């Protein structure tokens, strides 16, 4: 792969030459740390196809990131790359509880986003019957869930919340549904949402992680019997490192930092030390079913981290506090504003049905819990159930930043 990269991707040849390194100098994965990182901005500089290592007549599919943060990055796949994609997604599905013969309700968006077609290919390889519902049109999703009786659903965690809420609203008895497993990813989520989705849809919910640049969904996956202990990274294809976000130094197992991947087997779009910007830790779990390394759940993207009055804040930290309050559901939004030179965060969060959103005692409980665990005072606005907009099918924006920066 190193030779392919050196000979076929001008960006990488320049990097090797500039650093006086030749592919032959990299003798083990540990030696990769001699190389600089590849960042999203590098990919943008070569937009759209300049990072491809294979000619267009070898490319069988092109995807682009959904552009959550800026201009999309374009990725390509050879036939072999698509086979690898199918393989890692098939593994992920099994890890999440799926089996051949089951039906997959695929509510990830189809199109340039890797989610829909990625899950589709892996499920086909596994021998599942794929229902390519795609995202949105919640009425139709609910009809299919009831009538087609799929055993497995995949979508974003925030959309699974929406489906759970809508089932409740319409009086759909989710215990009577055939659905057993939910495989959720594409955005950060915590145990708070797992509890809500598992109870609301009567499923076992696991995490799937991935990004277009590395392959799409199926870079790592949580096992349905080991929930909460991290997601297995398919490290025979994607080599992970955790590095310090400021110095770039490789950190020991267990320490939190930026997740970096090197693709080991990809042909069309190989990447060396790709800086995902996602914050987590990696570690081997001796008691686990499988031997691959596990990554912890993603706290957030480094560039989505808010710095409020000098305190670093990821929205998942607020979600974790919400989990501990039995009068709340994790349907929430953070509104960031600036008054003078002072940044303020307002937490809008829904109460459970039957709870009075004007209850001052509950409001104060949340306020002091946030202050004690996160170290920031925030304005609290408790809201009635179903008053905060949820996902309509894709990734949900949890932070509304009203500051003019
Ligand atoms: P975009 O960068 O436009 O969102 P992608 O659809 O490729 O494009 O998204 C990949 C990103 O989505 C990851 O880098 C990560 O930030 C986020 N992501 C994907 N899966 C998960 C997950 N299970 N948990 C947390 N974040 C995730």
Image: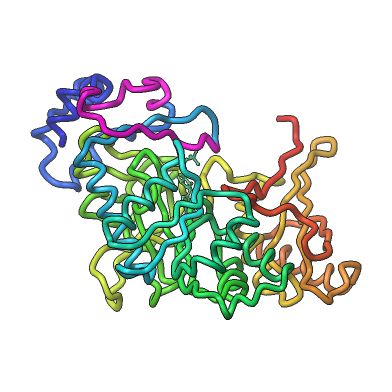
The residue shown at (44%, 56%) is 131
- The answer to whether residue 396 is left or right of residue 289 is right
x then y, percent, for residue 389: 73, 52
- The answer to whether residue 112 is left or right of residue 356 is left
**Residue 18 appears in view:** no
Task: Tell me the quadrant of the picture where the C terminus can be found.
Answer: top right
Q: Quadrant of residue 104?
A: bottom left
> Which of the two residues, 216 or 364, is positioned nearer the viewer here?
216
- Which residues are the magenta region? 42-68
Q: Compared with residue 330, is residue 249 higher up or lower down, i.e. above or below?
A: above
Q: Compared with residue 120, is residue 361 higher up or lower down, i.e. above or below?
A: below
> Which of the two residues, 168 or 199, is positioned nearer the viewer here?
168
Count all numbered tags in the image, as a single digit.
0
The residue shown at (69%, 59%) is 375
x then y, percent, for residue 247: 40, 40
- The answer to whether residue 87 is left or right of residue 228 is left
> Which of the two residues, 220 or 250, is positioned nearer the viewer here?
220
x then y, percent, for residue 380: 82, 59
Q: Quadrant of residue 306?
A: top right
> Which of the two residues, 405 or 289, is positioned nearer the viewer here?
289
Q: How is the image coloured?
A: rainbow
Residue 47 part of the magenta segment: yes
**Residue 37 appears in view:** yes
Residue 311 part of the magenta segment: no
The residue shown at (70%, 61%) is 331
x then y, percent, for residue 155: 51, 56
Task: Tell me the quadrant of the picture where the N terminus can be found.
Answer: top left
Q: Compared with residue 321, is residue 88 higher up or lower down, i.e. above or below?
A: above
């Amino acid at each position: 792969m190193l030779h392919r990269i050196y000979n076929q991707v001008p960006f990488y040849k320049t990097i090797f030459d500039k650093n006086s390194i030749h592919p032959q100098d990299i003798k083990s994965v540990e030696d990769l740390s001699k190389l600089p990182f590849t960042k999203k901005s590098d990919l943008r500089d070569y937009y759209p196809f300049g990072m491809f290592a294979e000619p267009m007549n070898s490319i069988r599919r092109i995807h682009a990131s959904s552009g959550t943060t800026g201009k999309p990055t374009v990725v390509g796949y050879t036939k072999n790359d698509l086979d690898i994609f199918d393989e890692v997604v098939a593994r992920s599905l099994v890890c999440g509880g799926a089996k051949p013969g089951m039906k997959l309700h695929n509510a990830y968006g189809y199109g340039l986003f890797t989610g829909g077609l990625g899950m589709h290919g892996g499920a086909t390889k596994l021998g599942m019957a794929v229902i390519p519902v795609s995202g949105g049109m919640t009425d139709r999703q609910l009809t299919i869930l009831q009538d087609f009786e799929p055993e497995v659903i995949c979508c974003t965690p925030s959309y699974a919340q929406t489906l759970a809420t809508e089932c409740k609203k319409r009086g759909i008895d989710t215990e009577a549904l055939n659905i057993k497993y939910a495989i959720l990813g594409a955005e950060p989520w915590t145990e708070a949402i797992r509890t809500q989705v598992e109870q609301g849809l009567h499923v076992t919910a696991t995490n799937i992680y991935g990004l277009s640049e590395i392959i799409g969904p199926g870079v790592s996956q949580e096992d349905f019997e080991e929930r909460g202990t991290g997601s297995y990274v398919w490290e025979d294809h994607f080599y992970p490192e955790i590095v310090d976000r400021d110095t770039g130094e490789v950190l020991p197992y267990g320490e939190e930092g930026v997740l970096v991947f090197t693709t080991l087997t990809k042909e069309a779009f190989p990447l060396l030390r790709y800086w995902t910007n996602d914050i987590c830790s990696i570690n081997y779990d001796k008691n686990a079913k499988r031997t691959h390394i596990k990554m912890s759940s993603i706290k957030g993207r480094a560039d989505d981290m808010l710095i409020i009055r000098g305190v670093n804040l990821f929205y998942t930290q607020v979600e974790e506090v919400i989990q501990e309050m039995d009068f709340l559901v994790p349907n929430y939004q953070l509104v960031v504003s600036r008054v003078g030179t002072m940044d303020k965060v307002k937490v809008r969060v829904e109460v459970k049905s039957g709870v009075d959103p004007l209850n001052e005692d509950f409001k104060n409980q949340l306020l002091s819990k946030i202050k004690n665990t996160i170290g920031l005072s925030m304005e609290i606005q408790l809201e009635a159930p179903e008053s905060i907009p949820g996902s309509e099918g894709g990734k949900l924006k949890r932070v509304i930043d009203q500051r003019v920066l």
